[in-house]
């Protein structure tokens, strides 16, 4: 199945159901350890139907990545209405963190794929996502500079700090869970959404307002 078909196919309800199941299994067990039969059994369909819709497990993965990765792009409509540069920055960071929790299975798959470096077909999708988010972050920084609130700082490095901080939280979840067992807080996700968001806001503002 050529990539053109994947990019232009309209997904029906059954395809979306298969994608949701595959996404969960790929995230939990990894792409290589998940078989088409595993997905078919969970979806209560035969293997032939998955092959009919997606042709292969690789194309199924590519479809779900391309379908879901749009949700990880910074969308200026969530924050550009804010006139205060600091509020705009806060809203952008909240949007960034929320987008990761909106589809955690996909985030785990993307992390696994980046680490494995086995399927280069996704390199372009990752590259375009990063370029898009760097540009959107640059717009937030430029706005703050124009308003006299921020100093300019390389948005590529700022995004790297955001990604690295979030990934570290994800990779060290067992350690964080153990730590959280000794504090009064609902869950790892609650902690991430609140404390991690506050931390990102703090370090971003510290960088953008620091004077040499």
Image (spheres, helix red, strand yellow):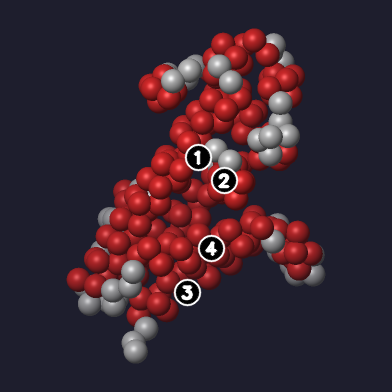
Label 1, residues with CA under 10 Å away: few <14, some 14-19, many ≥20: few
Q: Please indicate, yes or no, whether residue 139 appears anywhere in the rendered image.
A: yes
> Between disc 3 and disc 4, whose residue precedes?
4
Q: Secondary structure at mark 4?
A: helix
Residue 194: x percent and y percent?
Answer: 57, 63
Residue 205 image label: none
What distance separates the C-alpha of mark 1 from that of mark 2?
A: 7 Å
Q: Nearer the viewer, residue 14 or 3?
A: 3
Q: Which residue is mark 3?
A: 202
Quick check: marks 1 and 2 in contact, CB under 8 Å? Answer: yes
Q: Nearer the viewer, mark 3 or mark 4?
A: 4
What distance separates the C-alpha of mark 2 from that of mark 4?
A: 18 Å
Q: Residue at x 43, y 24 (%)?
A: 3
> Between disc 4 and disc 1, whose residue precedes?
1
Residue 62: x percent and y percent?
Answer: 51, 31
Q: Which residue is mark 1?
A: 120
Q: Secondary structure at mark 1?
A: helix
Label 3, residues with CA under 10 Å away: few <14, some 14-19, many ≥20: few
Q: Which residue is mark 2?
A: 117
What distance separates the C-alpha of mark 4 from that of mark 1?
A: 22 Å
Q: Is residue 73 left or right of residue 39?
A: left
Residue 164 image label: 4
């Amino acid at each position: 199945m050529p990539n053109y078909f994947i990019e232009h196919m309209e997904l029906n309800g059954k395809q979306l159901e298969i994608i949701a199941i595959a996404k969960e299994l790929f995230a939990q067990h990894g792409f290589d350890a998940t078989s088409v039969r595993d997905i078919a059994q969970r979806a209560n369909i035969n293997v032939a139907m998955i092959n009919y819709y997606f042709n292969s497990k690789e194309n199924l993965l590519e479809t779900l990545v391309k379908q879901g990765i749009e949700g990880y792009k910074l969308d200026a409509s969530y924050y550009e209405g804010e006139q205060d540069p600091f509020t705009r920055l806060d809203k952008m960071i909240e949007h960034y963190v929320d987008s990761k929790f909106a589809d955690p299975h996909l985030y785990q798959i993307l992390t696994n794929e980046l680490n494995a470096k086995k399927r280069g077909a996704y390199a372009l999708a990752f590259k375009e996502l990063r370029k898009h988010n760097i540009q959107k972050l640059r717009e937030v920084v430029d706005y703050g500079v124009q308003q006299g609130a921020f100093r300019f700082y390389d948005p590529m490095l700022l995004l790297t700090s955001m990604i690295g901080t979030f990934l570290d939280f994800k990779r060290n979840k067992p350690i964080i869970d153990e730590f959280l067992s000794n504090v009064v807080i609902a869950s790892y996700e609650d902690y991430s959404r609140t404390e991690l968001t506050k931390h990102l806001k703090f370090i971003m503002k510290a960088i953008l307002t620091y004077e040499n």
